[in-house]
Image (cartoon, rainbow, N blue to C red):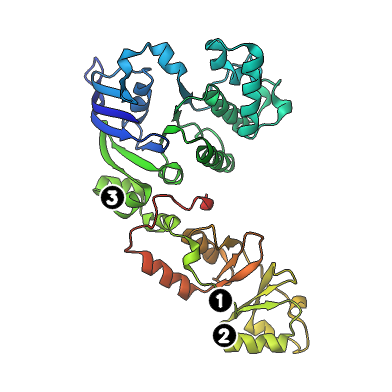
Amino acid sequence: MITFTGITKRYPDGTIAVDDLDIEIPAGRTTVFVGPSGCGKTTSLRMINRMVEPTTGLITVEGQDIRDRDPAVLRRSIGYVIQQAGLFPHRTIVDNIATVPFLLGWGKPRARARARELMELVGLQPEQAKRYPHQLSGGQQQRVGVARALAADPPVLLMDEPFSAVDPVVRTSLQDELIRLQAELHKTIVFVTHDIDEAVKLGDSIAVFRPGGKLAQLDTPERLLANPVDSFVEGFIGYDRGVRRLSFFPARLLTPRTDTVVGDDVQAGRARELALRSGEPWLLVVDGERGPRGWVSTETLGAADPGTVVGSLDLVDYGHVFTVETDSLRAALDAAVLSPAGRAVGVDADGRVVGVVAQSELGSAIWSVGAEEAPTAEPVRSDG
């Protein structure tokens, strides 16, 4: 556990970067510091490894006052990841990762063996070990930075906007990788970002800072979205916090309809009867393996020869799907919004269609959880 007690950072010109901060960061969890530029979140993070010294107050790591430890020794015991990785350009990837083990006196064979283990852990290829940073993409360099921070197996990992310098697709991939790593390693992670979506996705708890270095709210992501403490927090989170909160409710709360799903070998006349019976204007057409093929409307079915199989008709693209057992209500809503038919296609883990969620049922499910407390402190991570 990391504990801040009455921490203030005041610079000689009178500027207060952090103002009387009290916060407990639980061990083995990810705590995200978020807020606008200049609110003290990075300063707070850098005080943990004594890269910035507080003016007043006490910081302890596992009950030990960090002032009782030599700063250099303290930093070697804490992983640190920054923007753009901060790699040594003249060192190979394997030796960049082995930096802290080298400083701790590990022999080269042991340090490099550990580095190669970590390359695999963070998704880097073995042949990249002898390359140099400039030969890797930005996303790959950030993976090296994470591996380097983990090299000596530190209990604490500090991450200062580590993914902000890469494009959105790579950023999503790195976030997913961090979630996977944390599920395996259970480090005490302090993560700084200005992006509330990133904070909600990654954090077990979120600390929102105000301008002037004051802590506005410390809460789990779902409670932060449901109950912002004041107008500042509400404004920082954004107007769509209700939609974001759906990430914390599982899609398995839904009951997908199966009466609006037909095989691609069913004749148009029969399919039209099924559509009329269901009261739905669209049917989802699936192949023999129950993989989705596309939507067919009652208008198309009515205009077709009754003996024609629906698989040969002009089908409308089904959009994208959600996985019923692992995705969230937000994923289901997203699938429905992006579907040309306005309906979400639910599949199982193997991509076979489970059923279709009509707008009415999705709306009812969202309404039913709107005033509820989220069922777990863990978001349904598969939304991205």
Q: Position of residue 54 (x, y in %)?
A: 28, 19
Q: Residue at x 47, y 74 (%)?
A: 361
Q: Amino acid at mark 3?
A: Pro
What is the spatial separation of the Cα atoms under label 2 and label 1, in whole angstroms?
A: 10 Å
Q: Position of residue 121 (x, y in %)?
A: 61, 33
- Mark 1 sits on what residue? 257
Q: Amino acid at mark 2?
A: Ser
Q: Residue at x 26, y 36 (%)?
A: 215
Residue 85, compared with residue 34, is above or below; it is above
What is the spatial separation of the Cα atoms under label 2 and label 3, in whole angstroms?
A: 42 Å
Residue 195, compared with residue 299, is above or below; it is above
Label pair 2/1, CB-CB below 8 angstroms = yes
**Residue depth check, mark 1 versus mark 3: number of the one nearer the observer:** 1
Residue 133 visible within the image: no
**Left or right: 145 in relation to 49:** right
- Mark 2 sits on what residue? 278
